[in-house]
């Protein structure tokens, strides 16, 4: 789980929090007496990695890559078989319990 660094725009309080990429970014200062707007510090730690990887993924989707991915998905869909149910019968339930 990535760690994000924030800095309060009002009182200058700096803190870091661990949150999922899917979680919304914090917007309020954790100092109750302040509660000012906070700004996420970009370019430090995982923030830079996240930004870079996103660009890389977008750039990686060339025509050849999509063709290969399409070919691969088609092949896997035909070769993959659904998991067969085990042939062993269920044990009989005890009656009269
Ligand atoms: Zn603050």
Image: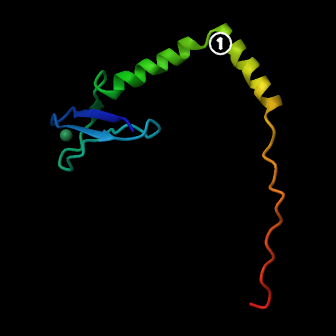
Q: Residue furthest top?
A: 63
In the picture of the structure, the residue carrying the numbered disc 1 is 65
What's the residue at 53%, 18% (across, down)?
57
| Residue sitting nearer the eye, 18 or 87 | 87
| Residue sitting nearer the eye, 8 or 78 | 78
**Would you say 2 lies left or right of 11 here?**
right
Vertical order, 20 against 76 (above or below)? below
Vertical order, 63 against 10 (above or below)? above
Q: Residue furthest front?
A: 88
Q: Residue furthest bottom?
A: 96
Q: How many marks?
A: 1
Tag 1, which secondary structure?
helix
What's the residue at 81%, 38% (across, down)?
81
From the Cβ of disc 1, is ligand 1 less than 8 Å away? no
Q: Quadrant of ligand 1?
A: top left
| Residue sitting nearer the eye, 63 or 27 | 63
**Would you say 56 lies left or right of 90 here?**
left
**Quadrant of res 62:** top right
For the N terminus, the quadrant is top left
Residue 39: x %, y % from top left: 28, 30
> Which colour scheme appears in the figure?
rainbow
What's the residue at 19%, 44% (across, down)?
34
**Quadrant of res 6:** top left
Vertical order, 34 against 94 (above or below)? above
At label 1, counting other C-alpha atoms closer than 10 Å, the crowd grade (few under 14, some 14-19, many 20 or more) is few
Residue 79: x %, y % from top left: 81, 30
What's the residue at 37%, 35% (across, down)?
2
Residue 45: x %, y % from top left: 30, 27
For the C terminus, the quadrant is bottom right
| Residue sitting nearer the eye, 56 or 9 | 56
């Amino acid at each position: 789980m990535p760690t994000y660094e924030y800095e309060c725009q009002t009182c200058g309080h700096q803190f870091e929090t661990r949150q999922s990429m899917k979680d919304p970014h914090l917007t309020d200062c954790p100092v109750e007496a302040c509660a000012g707007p906070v700004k996420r510090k970009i370019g430090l730690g995982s923030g830079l990695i996240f930004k870079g990887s996103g660009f890389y993924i977008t750039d990686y989707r060339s025509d050849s890559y999509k063709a290969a991915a399409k070919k691969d998905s088609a092949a896997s869909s035909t070769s993959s078989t659904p998991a067969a149910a085990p042939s062993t019968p269920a044990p009989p339930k005890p009656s009269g319990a």
